[in-house]
Amino acid sequence: MDSHWLSLFDVTIDFSQSHLFFPRIVTTLLGILLVMILVTRYRRIMPALRHAGRVVGGREGSFDRKRFFGTLVLVTLYFYLMGVLSDVFPNTGYSFLIMSVLFVFSLSLLYAERLSRRILLIITLNALIAPAIAWYVLAQLFRITLP
Amino acid sequence: MDILSHLTPMFFTLIAAGTLIGIIFGAIPGMTATMAVAVCLPLTYAFGLVNGIALLLGLYVGGISGGMVPAVLLNIPGTPSSITTTFDGYPMAQRGEGERALKTGIVASIFGGLFSAAVLFFFAPVLADFAIKFSYVEKFLIILLALTVIASLCSNMLMGIFSGVLGVWLSLIGTYSITEGGNGEPRLMFDFMQYYLIDGFSLLPVLIGIFGLSTILLDAENGFADAPGQGRIKLQGGARFSFSIFKGQLVNLIRSSGIGTFVGMLPGVGGSAASVLAYSQEKNFSRDSSQMGKGATQGIVASESSNNALTGGALVPLLSLGIPGDSTTAILIGAFTLQGIQVGPLFIGNNMDTWYLMIIALVAANVLMFGIMYFAIRHIAKVIEVPKYILYPLIVMMCVVGAYAINYGIMFDVWTLLIFGVFGYVAQKIGLEVVPLIIGFILGKSAEVYFVKSIESYGNLTIFFTKSPIAVFLWVLIAVSVAFAIYLRVRNRRREASSLVE
């Protein structure tokens, strides 16, 4: 009788479908947990979303839209153009070097609180020198693959 | 001896360089040891295993130690684990005893670091020997236990569990690897994604995105306002540092280091938990705690010895079980994989030389950290003034190198960086817990293999309970950790309720 009872827990996994076995369990678990979260705090979700909308819209709190979205746009452009340019100069790292100089310079400009001639000079020098050093050390000395 | 041939000047130079860079990262508020390790990863591609490890361990120890600098001087913890250093460090700095506070912290740090290195050295091989006997069943239960402990210690248990499961889910995207005994079929994605995601998301770009890029996004949102203007703090002027501060502090040192090491071993429990625990224990047990919070050296000793003890502690489960103890060791696991090393129960036995070299590197990193910080603390204190508009663009640039080079030039890995950078940002905004998510992501694939293989070989679910006494013991531990979490929650709720009544 004992073995009969235990056979309730018998599981066989079809090898051709075995790649779905564990993901299904995890997905189900994730769904259950999500429902639990939504049920226990549905009252707080809508006000929080509305609040977030107001903050991002700049009507409430101190959300720096210029710097936040500027960062996202610059990083996306940096990655995209680096990919495009690396087809022009494959396996040299030139694409990385050129795009990094431009990216570091523009992101520094975006982040700087105020711009004096001295700060501008520091930013420019930093944008020229740092990527060049990184490129030289990594691509030339260490032979690391760069875009 | 083969080991001696590895102890080259290069080895020690890299440890020193790593420690120094780590201290600088730790000293800049918002930048952590994890970030230091992530940013410097590309450098390790070029070095061999031993030298790479030397650099990484230096970064780890330096990164944790550097956090005390802004904690004392600006009242801002440089890393989460130095939060309790601000309680006593900043009041001391206001009295003109900044240097005294920092040097106290430095001495406490090296004590904690060496204490935990000793624990690592003696305890990890024992644990690994024990774990070698584990079959797939026990290995699966160990991962389940790790995830349970992490999730149950989160501030919100439901969100913690959800984050951990989400991490596992994300790790399953890709194919069920043939090398692990799977059938090589893709899952959890649409057909058009197969070209990019055939191997799933790479671990390191995910980690670099979550810890590097999302930190920058979080800071960008705040617009880089200057640090709260408290004016310049005098390093000197008040009482001077002398080693007599440590008279009567031995119990405190050992207790705090022990707490730090133990908390470090628990997977996913952050550094702030260790220092807060050590600090509150010192407050409870010391003969005179009346000055704590007003600038007592004993508070700094408790805080700094415990957070440096984390380093050795967090390496214990990493090297003996293959389970990372915190976010920094999570990146270390990636770095090891990169060097072709599989961390797990067999690691120490199969790589004796590497194991000894790691211990040597860890001890050397602590000693060098002490040397650099003790004698150059005044110069390091200036680092916190380096503007972020110079640093952050360079960090993004280094993140790109790390992500791109990881699989020898895949542009999709760079996009992974952005995807998970944004994901990490949103996750923190909606209250997901990053650490369980990461640990779930790292362990998810192994969990699947262990789980599916266990069932394939035994064909019955009860095997997870009846396989061996160890399996039963692991279930007991899982139950205890859940019960303990519920107990803590109930107690806290009662305390809150009673304080409201008063």
Image (cartoon, grey):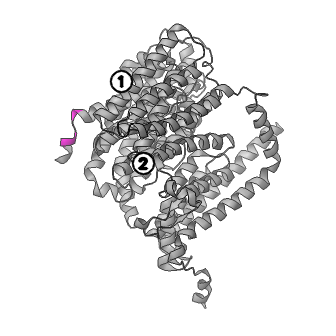
A110 is higher (above) or lower (below) than B50: above
Depth check: give the residue in front, B257 or A81. Answer: A81
Q: Main secondary structure of the magenta part?
A: helix
Residue at position x 28%, y 30% from top?
A: B13
Depth check: give the residue in front, B348 or A18. Answer: A18
Could you tell me the amino acid type at mark 1?
Ile
Quarter of the image for residue A52 reads: top right
Quarter of the image for residue B431 reads: top right
- Provide the residue designation for mark 1: B372
Q: Is residue B108 visible?
A: no
In percent of width and height, residue B241 lies at 43, 17
The chain ID associated with circle 1 is B
- Provide the residue designation for mark 2: B334
Q: Are marks 2 and 1 on the same chain?
A: yes
In percent of width and height, residue B38 lies at 45, 38
Q: Residue furthest bottom?
A: A1
